[in-house]
Amino acid sequence: MIVAEAVGRALAACGAETVFGVVGSGNFHVTNALVAAGARFVAARHEGGAATMADAYARMSGRAGIVSVHQGPGLTNALTGIAEAAKSRTPLIVLAGEATDRRSNFSVDQDALAAAVGAVPMRVAPAEGAWEQAVEAYRVAVEGRRTVLLNLPLDVQAMPCDPPAGPTAAGGGESGVSPARGAAVEELARLLSRSRRPVFIAGRGARRARRELEALADRAGALLATSAVAKGLFRGSPWDLDVSGGFATPLAAELIRGADLVVGWGCALNMWTTRHGSLIPQDGKVAQVDLDRSALGAHVPVDLGVTGDVAAVATALAAQLTTGGVAPDTTGAGPAGAAGYRSPELARRIQAEGRWRDVPYADESGGGRIDPRTLTIGLDDLLPIERILSIDSGNFMGYPSMFLDIPDERGFCFTQAFQSIGLGLATAIGAALAQPDRLPVAALGDGGALMGAAELETVVRLGLPMVIVIYDDEAYGAEVHHFGPHGHPLDTVTFPPADLAAIARGHGFAAVTVTTPADLAGVADWLKGGRDRPLLVHAKVTRNRGSWWLEEAFKGH
């Protein structure tokens, strides 16, 4: 076989099932080799979209993402999506042709590009070890939870190479997790046993440890919260506070601030999750558990850091609390002899005040525009709960994040580590393909929607029954509300009206324009129909004020 074929077959043997990309001459043969080996190829209309689709697919499927791009401009077009994946520690492999002749107009320093955005550059060379090098790239991506650029030099791709000498085992799987033990785990057990108001905040690194964390929380009497990317992890628990940070309900913020011990589980505890540290209790202690030692204390000071797998550490702690004389309370009220942070009264408050739609507000709809809260609550009532919600970035993003409910952590995809607008539609496509049994819902601002509009055709071509909701304030709203109050001119960040529903219809969508709650009848009609076309909801939203979560975030700028 030739090198391009070996790389494609090796990655397929490792478990690559779905590949996203835009095919050019430099990645034509490796992409076809993947398809020939059984992988599905999903053609995007822009490499940036392809990278984000692969990122979202990896997040929501639990498998490594694969994206295939042309050399030079194919890679540079994908860089924003690659940066988002790298910052999020998404297991992702970027296959890119590489022009090694400096005289080529496609020649750029692809290693430097990858390293600059936090990805790991690797290369298939020499030809003889192509299969093994592809397997190693897959292993680094999955076991290290890294985004890997696997460069495929053009002059090497066509060279002959030998098939693997031994069995072609998949390889690259999750590495074994050693039992959690040691002084740090014992100290965390002591902190938990002494705590009377513990709160757990789980991040992306805890998304597959719900059972272990809930078992430990029952023993410690802890309340449960998540970062935005892990939203939904504890859905259904009576002690679920939902998201900590800028999206936190007033009740969640009150209870997290009132904790005497906050434990971050696979969670960065960054400025978003802690509201610039304001949610960290002044007189309480902070502990953090993470596989990556460098993550401990990176954003807020911690009293105790534990390096280890979240599920393994939680299991070890639960055993220590039990064997140490703190037996589980079958009422769910926490450790014997202490209620922890749990009480019947608090359970009633969480039930009554624990979701944003339970918080009263004054509806500001009028003048041909709908209050985004009213819009989102109306959509929440209409759309089936078995949904997968993907969010773009911008002034609007808190409304769908806070007012649209989801069934569990597999129902929310939040590609926001790089805070780039324009990734939302591609995110929704990748998430939809990872969770095909759910209704895909994309929430976009008008700016991000127009940036990513090339992928509207992809939604139609793939036959996805997607609902795209565009919160249209005819501006880059974050900048309007950041600079406007200081008297700065806003001509550079405001725009004339655009008929986004007509644009969608031109791509083959059904579309409705919403300016009042009554206009949501068009959404209800689409849901009752055959859903044979995707639906775009062009919502003209009120724009009188900035979002409170971005006002909080701008304190750090």
Image: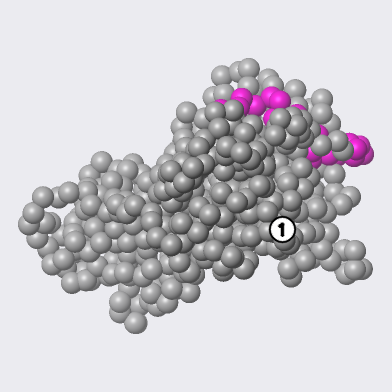
Residue most extreme to the bottom: 103
Q: Quadrant of the C terminus?
A: bottom right
Q: Nearer the viewer, residue 376 or 422?
A: 376
* Residue 15 percent across, percent down from the top left: 28, 46
* Residue 123 visible somewhere in the drawing: yes
Q: Is residue 352 left or right of residue 302?
A: right
Q: Residue at x 19, y 56 (%)?
A: 6
Q: Is residue 510 magenta?
A: no
* Residue 145 visible somewhere in the drawing: no
Q: Is residue 374 magenta?
A: yes
Q: Residue at x 75, y 23 (%)?
A: 521
Q: Residue at x 66, y 47 (%)?
A: 196
Q: Is residue 180 left or right of residue 415?
A: left
Report the label total.
1
Quadrant hosting residue 384: top right
* Residue 552 percent across, percent down from the top left: 77, 59
282 up-or-down from 170: above or below: below
Q: Tag 1: residue type?
A: Pro
Q: Quadrant of the N terminus?
A: bottom left
Q: Which residues are magenta?
A: 362-389
Q: Residue at x 63, y 40 (%)?
A: 338
For label 1, the residue is: 281
* Residue 499 percent across, percent down from the top left: 74, 42
Residue most extreme to the top: 528
Q: Nearer the viewer, residue 496 or 221?
A: 221
Question: Is the residue marked by circle 1 packed among few (<14), some (14-19), or many (20+) residues within 10 Å?
Answer: some
177 up-or-down from 429: above or below: below
Q: Nearer the viewer, residue 242 or 538?
A: 242
